[in-house]
Amino acid sequence: MTRPIRLLILCALTATACRAQPPSEPVILDGSSTVYPLADAVAREFTKANRRMPVTVTFSGTTTGMMKFCHGLLDIATASRPITVDEQKACEMAGISFVELPVGHDAITVIVNAKNTWATSITVPELRTLWEPQAEKRVTKWSDVRKDWPVRDIKLFAPGKESGTFDYFTEVINGGVDASRSDYTSSGDDRVIVDGVARDELALGYVGYGYFERNKQRLKALAVDDLDDHVGQGPIEPSPSSVGRGLYRPLSRPLFIYLNVSRARRPEVVAFARYFVRNAGLFSSQAGTMPLAGAAYQLAEQRLTRMTPGTMFKVPRAAELGVEDLLTR
């Protein structure tokens, strides 16, 4: 029997044998603008190798993304901070179990205009002086932050309350999420913050490291002096090296994806999550994030394989532990 005849018989007996499989429903991600460049880079490469497994990546801010996630609207949420207690409760009430997967590190970067000639570093107490709620309409000039800085208006740009960057910054600098002055130009899109600072010599803001790295011809990053933890260290500049060595504190942070366990019934969702964990380190430099150290990615993949539910940040003093330590507990 010739090959064409055999193929015709096979097609007649098996309806799907000669019909191309349709593409699956997209894997849906939303959340952090900081994680977005990494998620987008991973998704592009994943879909090149898996053309029938489309992935849709957007960003609306960590807080907004987690709200969508806990309403069952996402397969995967991206986050620039750990899930909060309130978000855990919201997910629990909605019957949504999740797997928390670290995928990288970031350094929240304090940025000024490239033409700024007076500021090269800033201390944590000075950041608090500038950004605490009591500073609103009171700390308005550069000289209000440091006496030898110019007696000129300071123009502030930063993320809004939908942002995990805002949450993390306000907590570690001002001592509480949402503890911030509000008289500044806010945006959930870090590119708006970058453009605002790049256009105004008197501006200052804070963004994820990747947005500074991609715009460093127009911006300058201030070294941060954590007077409490780095006595004798002096100001530390944000960089992969300073973050990896644990020197850039308190503004370095882990980055995450959160997988909806019920969506793991779809093989394409698990396949993408596994690809993300395995390859996040490879794409970190082009995405402006920093890779995890040691065996963290292998441990994260084990967490995914086991579908270990819940957050790692329930252990005492979790924020002071490294990601690899948390993954082994």
Image (cartoon, helix red, strand yellow):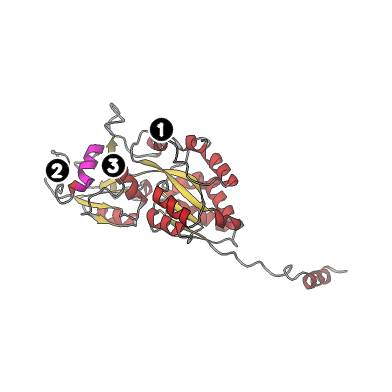
Magenta-colored stretch includes residue 10: no
- Of the pair 107 and 62, the residue shown nearer to us: 62
Mark nearer the N terminus (3 vs 1) = 3
Extreme front residue here?
Answer: 93
Observer-side mark, 3 or 1, equals 3
Name the mark on residue 175.
Answer: 3
Depth-wise, is mark 2 or mark 3 nearer the camera?
3
Circle 2 is placed at which residue position?
Answer: 144
Q: In percent of the image, x 45 and y 60: which residue is there?
A: 71
3D distance between C-alphas at marks 2 and 1? 33 Å
Disc 2 residue type (three-letter): Asp
Residue appearing at x 31%, y 54% in the figure: 161
The residue depicted at 45 percent of the width and 48 percent of the height is 286
Kindly report the distance in space between the C-alpha atoms of the residues bearing marks 2 and 3: 21 Å
Amino acid of disc 3: Gly
Q: Is residue 12 above or below residue 301?
A: below
N-term-proximal mark, 2 vs 1? 2
Give yes or no for contact between labels 2 and 1 (Cβ–Cβ under 8 Å): no
Q: Is residue 220 visible?
A: yes
Q: Could you tell me residue 200's position as x and y percent?
A: 21, 53
Residue 287 % position (x, y): 43, 49
Q: Position of residue 177 (x, y in %)?
A: 31, 47
Secondary structure at numbered mark 3? loop
Residue 131 lies in the magenta-colored region: yes
Q: Which residues are magenta?
A: 120-133
Q: Secondary structure at mark 1?
A: loop
Picture disc at residue 245:
1
